[in-house]
Amino acid sequence: MIKVTVPATTANIGPGFDCLGMALNLYTNVTFEEIEEGLTIKGCQAEFQNQDNLIYQSMLEGFKKIGYKCRGMKITIDSNIPISRGLGSSAACILAGIIGANEIANAQLTKPQILKIATQMEGHPDNVTPALYGGMIVSVYDNDEVYFSKIPLNDSMDFYALIPDFTLSTSEARSVLPEQIPFNDATFNVGRVALMIASFFNGNSDLLNVSIRDKLHQKYRGALIHEYDTIMERLNDLQVKGAFLSGAGPTIIAIANKNDNTTESAVINILQDLKNRWTFKKLCTEINGAIVRRG
């Protein structure tokens, strides 16, 4: 029996569109057991307990790359990563499946090979790379290769995830993005993402509110999210260190200095009178990435 644990991720982090991501301490745990025949999937909604399950499909892709023929499979899922909320649930499923296949086939794939397969399936590396390696990572996908670098983080910040009771698909969130952007918007983001990475590295949270701003995707995606503008305005009024849309949304993440309980309680309070129900989770960076246990 093999158990794979993959963390949640937040991608983009404001201006780092499709290239920047961070692993967070929410997890998808998947147990794999090869059986004589057939497929059994437990721990998810009935509509996903079949051969179209993303974890199973990713496992098949891993087996295909390795050249391993599986007899049958029992998959048990225990996940606290919310689905379609911008916290990397699909990246976690893809990695879990590929890593599970690799372990069943006696670990013939290296981590870079696993990353490449996962990126091919996901379409971009900003979620799968930190989910696999942990921490905050800059990654690009060029000529079918993933190039990435892990950013050493100053451990001085907490992350508050504001998670709504409604979903937003990545495809819908991408459909509203413009095909072309003004040159000034591009230069705006280049400067901000460079300053933001330096701010995280140095632990200079006072620069985050300036550096975390974005002109490429958030204003377009925000229009799809109920009460987005209201929440962002309230967060700005609280003077949090920064706030951004997690991945494609609809989750919003705010940043505060570690153990700042005053800001934490204030953020919880701004969610009380909204039309939709928003859940608050205090998170931190997951530095280890995906792990495997046998037994």
Image: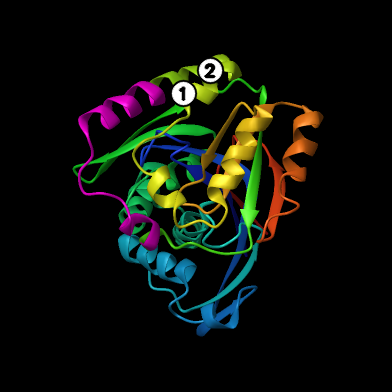
Count of numbered tags: 2
- Which residue is more in the foreground, 272 or 85? 272
Lateral position of residue 97 relative to residue 295, left or right = left
Tell me the element at label 2.
helix
Q: Nearer the viewer, residue 242 or 139?
A: 242
Q: Is residue 274 visible?
A: yes
Label 1: element kind: helix
Separation of residues labelled 2 and 1 (CA atoms): 6 Å
Q: Residues within 10 Å of mark 1 (few under 14, many from 20)?
A: many
**Image height check: is 189 above or below 146?**
above
Q: Say which residue label 2 marks.
A: 207
Q: Which of the 4 image quarters holds residue 160?
A: top right
Q: Residue at x 32, y 54 (%)?
A: 123
Residue drawn at point x = 52 percent, y = 57 percent: 89
- Report x, y in % for residue 268: 75, 44
Q: Amino acid at mark 2?
A: Leu
Q: Quadrant of the N terminus?
A: bottom right
Q: Which residue is more in the foreground, 137 or 188?
A: 188
Q: Looking at the image, which residue sits at the far bottom?
A: 38
